[in-house]
Every structure is written in C-alpha cells, then in structure tokens.
Amino acid sequence: MQRSSRELSNRVDINVHREPNRLRRTAWWLASWAGVGSLLWLSLQHLQGEHQIYQAGDVTMSHRLFENECWRCHTTWAPLQRLISLSDDAHSIDNKKCLTCHRIGEHHDNQIPAHRDISCAACHQEHEGAEMLTKPSSRHCIACHIDLKTIHGPSEVFAKQVTRFDQLEGHPDFLLKALTKDATTAPLPHAKHGANRAIENFQRPGDDAPHWQDRGRIRFNHAAHLKAEYDANGKLIHGLIGKDRKFTDLSRSCEVCHEPDHEGRFLKPISFESHCRECHPLLFDHERFPGQAVPHQTPDIVRGFLTETYTLREFGSRKVEGGTPNDSPSRPLPGHRDFQRLSKDQAKVVLDEVTKAEQLAQQHRHSQFGYEATGGCRYCHEVKSVASKSATAIADWKIEPSNIPSRWLVHSQFHHKPHRLLSCTACHAGVAQSKNTGDVLIPSIDICRACHSQQPAEWLAGLKSDAGDKSASPKSPPIESLKDLLSTVNRGARTSCIECHDYHDPTKEKWNGPFAP
C-alpha cells in the first residue's frame, strides 16, 4: 500500500533544528579551550621570564654582532599592521637603516617601481634562515618581470615576460644563441644589450653572406688543435706537439689553454706568451737570429725592435769610422752626444733588412723554418697596410683588433667550479668539430635546463649523448654526458632567478665612510 505525503512527513521531527549539534559543539569547545590554554601558557612563560616565545628566529651570521640591538634595524612594530591590512608590504625596517652599512648600488634608473620605492625587507627577509637573506625568492623578481615595463613603456632591452626558468615559455633562450641559430625568428638585440659585446652580424673572409657570429677577428680552429689519434692499445700516435716535445692530446686537456681564475668562476684570457708562443713563434730571421722572435705587440713596437736589432748588428759587423770592428757594441748613456751614427749606406741596409724581416714575420706560414714555426702574424690576425709618414718611426701596417670577448653572458653570473663534475664537452658540445672562429660554443638554455629543472627527466629525451666523444679530460669524473648524470635523478638543481642574476649593480656600490652610525 502506497503511503501519502502527509504520513511520510509525520515521521520527521520539525524541531530537529532546535536540538544541539554535538559535533559542532564539541569542535567549538575544543577551539575555545585551545585558545584559553595558549593564552595561559604564554602568560605563564612570561611570568617565568621566558621571552623567547615572543621573539623571531635567529638572525643571519653576518648580523649576529648586534643581534641583541634590535633598534639598529627595526623602527616600528608592523605585525599588527600587516595583520589588519592583510598585506605583506608593511615592514618594520626602514631602508635608511640598511644603508647605514650596506651602501648598495641601484639597478636601472628607468625601472618601475623606482629603486628608492622598494623596501629592502621585501626581498631580504631576516629571521628566516641564512638563505632567505642572501637568496630571495623568485616571486619578487617575477612580480615585475612577468610584464616588464619602464618609465618609457615596455622594455626594449630585455625580455618583456619571464615567469620561470625550467619552462620553454617561461624564459627565452640566450639571445646570442638564438641569433646564431636562426636570426630570422630571434629578436634583434638593443644597442644596450650585452649580446653586442660577444657577437656581431658581419661577413668574415670566406663566408657566403653576413651572419651573427663570434665578433672575434682572430683565426682559430678548434678541430685542428683537438685532433688526436690512438692505436689499438690506446696509445696516442698523433696529436699536438706539447712543451715536452711529445704528442699531447689537447682534446682531453682543455685546461691547458682554458685556465680557471683564482676563484674558479671564470676562465683566464688566452695569452700568446703562455698558450701560443711555444708552437707559433714569430720568427723573422732564423739564419742570423736562430730562435729569436719579434714581440707580440703593436706594429710600431715590432718595427722598433727590428730597427734596434739590425742597427746593433750593423755596428757589430762593420768598422766604425776611426775604430775597429765592434763585436759587442754598448748603448750610449742617456744625455750624452758621443754616440755612434750610421752612415747613409748603413741606414739603407738596416731599413731594407727591417722591411724584409717584417714581411717574414707577417707570413702566413714559415715552412722554411721547420715545424716549430707554423705561422706568423697573418696566420691568426688580419694584417692591413696603412699610410706611414715616416718609414723608420711608424710602421706602415696594422693588426686588426682581435675583439675576443672577455664575457659572453654579461647579464648573468656563472661559476665553473660547481660544474666540474661534468666534462667540458658535456656543455660545450661540438667543440672538437668546430673549424670556424665565428662558432659560438657556449651552451644553449636547453643544456642548462637539463640540470636546472624541477623535473630534469623531461629534458633527457631531447639531449644527444656525447659519451662517445673523446674530448673529455681524463682528470674529470667519468661523466661525459648529461644523460649519464641525470639517468637516476628525479629532482634537478635550483632554478631561482638569483642563481644566475643579480639585482643590485655592484659597480655602483659605495664603500667610503664608516659602517656604523
């Protein structure tokens, strides 16, 4: 029999909402007693002289000298203001307190918000561990760089949107790598961008058309210097002649030329005297001056050196008027006029010998001198003729500046020492095959993301293993590819902005005056 709606409604107690809810009442009483208990415990601790519960965490090591002098940093009490306003912009530290000791430099004059309007405590948060003070969170950087604007409008120098490093859309590729890969799709660098210090759009002798490449005007072939052959027993049978006059495999000894500085951060500049002179001496007259080379200096200094060399030889090989042959002529004292002079015929002979020696020193190859002299000035440099007012004082030729970049990624910071776990070719791929000076051999951002990513395994599929490359150093651990390193890694290296970028400009820091008021 089917029941009516009236009969069904009689089964419901219409006063159920007036009855107490035991679960809700129990939760309310527990919360109330927890609050009362916390207040009683705080009061008891205060009466017993225990005030640590009211204090923030420990200060960083650099600030522990005055950790009990809170007034040195704090000017107001901001927690209540921060709680009421529900904003993190309220701080109890005035920037003037920070500037008492830290005379830091501003970043960009056209930034928004202006440097003076940014609170130091907004990024450098004390009492939260040492890392938080020196390495602020990336969210402070992204707050502006998610839509980068200046007082003149959108930024024309840097990327207008950066959100995170380990995503394709979150951070653009390094501009100089993007231009050398495909200049048609990459944005052209602004005149103030640091990429202009490393690469340039020009046509090198032998190029089909102008393109973005290393702006260095010196000729160098990595493949020729890194070529090596081994026999079946693993013995080196062909390589570069080293200082010990034996075959040396430079492909496994990158540090022979690329020496780290005292900090291990950057690499020292290549020096002709230290790295090139042994195999490429600038010989000029191997018969009369065996093994002697012209200085690796400007053409004027080279001409002066040759003029002095052949002048002294002329004095030593010919009779001077009123005297006998002088085999070891001495230089006259400064200020004295009683020095010997060359005759017109002798001066002409010296000039001819200097001119001939300059031409020999400039030759592209010195095969007549043997293997130890495989090149002169033109072997590496571009030599051009110029008009000379004096044939004896100023050289009539010049060397094009080498323009070798001292820094490649000038808007970032890098430290080689923490990366010594990897071989050089794990990041600088293609070095052993590079034959053109214009090749830009720094790693792309994809190589960096292989390690600096929350999920490095996502990048492994796109990487090519270079484990078969013999250009790794034998002194390095056997990790010659990023795949070998990350095959068992689930989490990568840190990806925060501060790992590669600085906000404050260190060149504008001021160190004059006392540190304390």
Image (cartoon, grey):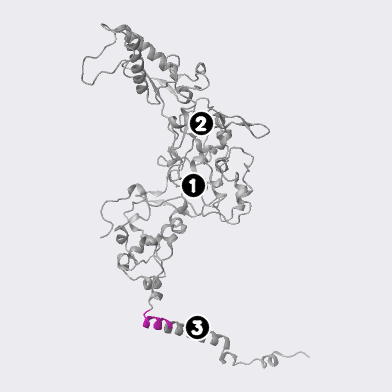
Q: Residues within 10 Å of mark 3 (few under 14, many from 20)?
A: few
In the displayed structure, 185 sits above or below 8; it is: above
User: Is residue 182 shown to the viewer in this render?
Assistant: no
Looking at the image, is 391 positioned above or below residue 82? Answer: above
N-terminal label among 1 and 2: 1
Labels 1, 3: front one: 1
Q: Which disc number belongs to residue 417?
A: 1
For marks 1 and 3, the one nearer the N-term is 3
Precedes in sequence: disc 2 or disc 3: 3
Q: For the magenta stretch, what is the residue range? A: 41-49
Q: Return the x and y of residue 25 as percentages of the image width and height.
A: 54, 87
Q: Is residue 276 above or below residue 470?
A: above
What secondary structure prevails in the magenta region? Answer: helix
State the image coordinates of residue 152 (x, y, percent, origin top left): 37, 48
* Amino acid under disc 2: Thr
Q: Amino acid at mark 1?
A: Lys
Rate crowding at label 2 as few (under 14), some (14 to 19) or many (20 or more) other CA atoms within 10 Å. some
- Residue 47 part of the magenta-drawn span: yes
As drawn, the label of residue 31 is 3
Look at the numbered discs 1 and 2 and tell me whether their residues touch, using CB distance below 8 Å.
no
Residues under labels 2 and 3: Cα distance?
73 Å
In the rendered image, residue 39 lying in the magenta stretch gets the answer no
Q: Nearer the viewer, mark 2 or mark 3?
A: 2
| Residue 180: percent from left, percent from top | 52, 37
Q: Which residue is mark 2?
A: 437
Q: Residue at 38% of width from left, 15% of height from top? A: 354
Numbered disc 2: secondary structure: loop
The answer to whether marks 2 and 3 mark residues whose Cβ atoms lie closer than 8 Å is: no
Q: Quadrant of the C terminus?
A: bottom left
Q: Quadrant of residue 235?
A: top right
Q: Is residue 461 visible from the viewing direction of this image?
A: yes
State the residue at coordinates (57%, 49%): 450
